[in-house]
Amino acid sequence: MKKSLWILVLLVSMGVILIGLMAQEFTYVGVNKCKICHKAEKRGNQYGKWLEGPHSKAFEALKSDKAAEIAKKAGVTTPPTESAECLECHSPYASSAPEFKEEGVGCEACHGPGSGYKSLKAMKDRNLAVEKGLVLLDTDAKKEALCTKCHKADHKYHEIKPFNLQEFWSKIEHKKPAE
Ligand code: HEC
Ligand code: HEC
Ligand code: HEC
Ligand code: HEC
C-alpha cells in the first residue's frame, strides 16, 4: 500500500476512537448537584419529591431482612447491596459511579448522566441540554419504556406490583407549577 493510504487509514481510525470517547463523555454527578437548583417550591421542588418518594429508598431497601430472604431464594450468595443482580434496578449507576451508590434510583437514572447538561446555560435551552446528554421523557411511550426497564412484569427475583403508567406516575410526578 502507498504511504499516503496508510496515513489515511491511521487518521480514520483515530477519528473513530475520538468519536467513541466523545460518546462516553457524560458522567454521573449525583443528586446533590441537581438539588442546588431543583429544590425551590416555585420550580416544583423535584428534589424534595424524590427524597420523600420510593426511589430514594431503593438502595436502603436492599439492607432489609426481606431483601436477604429474596436474595437467598434467588441463589444470590453475595449481600444484596453488593450484588449486580439487585443493583441493576435498586441502584442502576452503582458500578459506573460507586460514590453515588446509596442514592438508589437517583435523578440521573431517569434523566441521564448530568455532567454535560447541569450547567444553567444548558438547562435553560432544551436542545442544548439534550445534546449534552439529557434524556427527554416527554411522551407516554418514552416514560413507559423507561419505567418498565425495572417495573417489569416478568421479574426474576421477587413479586412486583403490575405496572400502570398513570397510577405509578401520579405517585412520583414532579412537575414545575404553572407560572
Ligand atoms: C444551575 C442550576 C441547575 C442545575 C445544577 C440543574 N438544573 Fe435542571 N433545570 C434548571 C433550570 C433553570 C431548568 C428550566 C426549568 C425551570 O425553570 O425549572 C431546568 C430544567 C430541567 C429539566 C426539564 C428539561 C426539559 O426541558 O424538559 C430536567 C429534566 C432537569 N432540569 C433535570 C436536572 C437534573 C437531573 C440535574 C442534575 C444532574 C439538574 N437538572 C441540575 C436548572 C438546573
Ligand atoms: C428488574 C428490576 C429489579 C431487580 C433486578 C430487583 N428488584 Fe427489588 N424491586 C424492584 C421494584 C420495581 C420494586 C418495587 C416494588 C413493586 O412495585 O412491587 C422492588 C422492591 C423490592 C423490595 C421491597 C422494598 C420495600 O420498600 O418494601 C425488596 C426488599 C427488594 N426489591 C429486594 C430485591 C433484591 C434482594 C434483589 C436482588 C436479588 C432485587 N430486589 C432485584 C425492582 C427490582
Ligand atoms: C432503575 C430502576 C427503576 C426505574 C427506571 C423506575 N423505577 Fe420505580 N422503583 C424502582 C425500585 C427499585 C422501587 C422500590 C423502591 C423501594 O420500595 O424501596 C420503585 C418503586 C416505585 C414506586 C412505588 C411502588 C409501590 O410500592 O407502591 C412507584 C410509584 C414507582 N417506582 C414509579 C416509577 C415510575 C412512574 C417510573 C418511570 C417514570 C419508574 N418508577 C422508574 C426502580 C425503578
Ligand atoms: C423514575 C424516574 C425519574 C426520577 C428518579 C426523576 N425524574 Fe424527573 N422526570 C421524570 C419524568 C418521566 C418526567 C416527565 C417528563 C415530561 O413529561 O416531559 C420528569 C420531569 C422532570 C422535570 C421537568 C418538570 C417540568 O414540569 O418542567 C424536572 C425539572 C425533573 N424531572 C427533575 C428531576 C430531578 C432534579 C430529579 C432528582 C431529584 C428527578 N427529576 C428524578 C422521571 C424521573
Image (cartoon, rainbow, N blue to C red):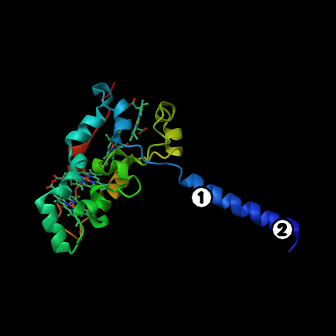
User: Residue 120: horizontal and vertical position, in percent?
Assistant: 47, 31
Tell me the element at label 2: helix
- Residue 150, horizontal then vertical, whole percent: 29, 60
Amino acid at the residue labelled 1 = Gly
Q: Local crowd at mark 1 within 10 Å, few (<14), some, or many (≥20)?
A: few
**Which dot marks residue 29?**
none
> Label 2 vs label 1: CA separation?
23 Å
The residue identified by callout 2 is 5
Q: Is residue 75 above or below residue 109?
A: below
Q: Amino acid at mark 2?
A: Leu
In the displayed structure image, the side of residue 167 where residue 2 appears, left or right:
right
Q: Relative to the observer, which residue lies in front, 67 or 8?
A: 67
SS for callout 1: helix
Within 10 angstroms of label 2, few (less than 14), some, or many (20 or more) residues?
A: few
| Quadrant of the snapshot with the C terminus | top left
Q: Tell which circle, 2 or 1, labels the residue nearer the N-terminal end.
A: 2
Q: Are marks 2 and 1 in contact (CB under 8 Å)?
A: no
Residue that badge 1 annotates: 20
Asked whether 66 or 53 is in front, the reply is: 66
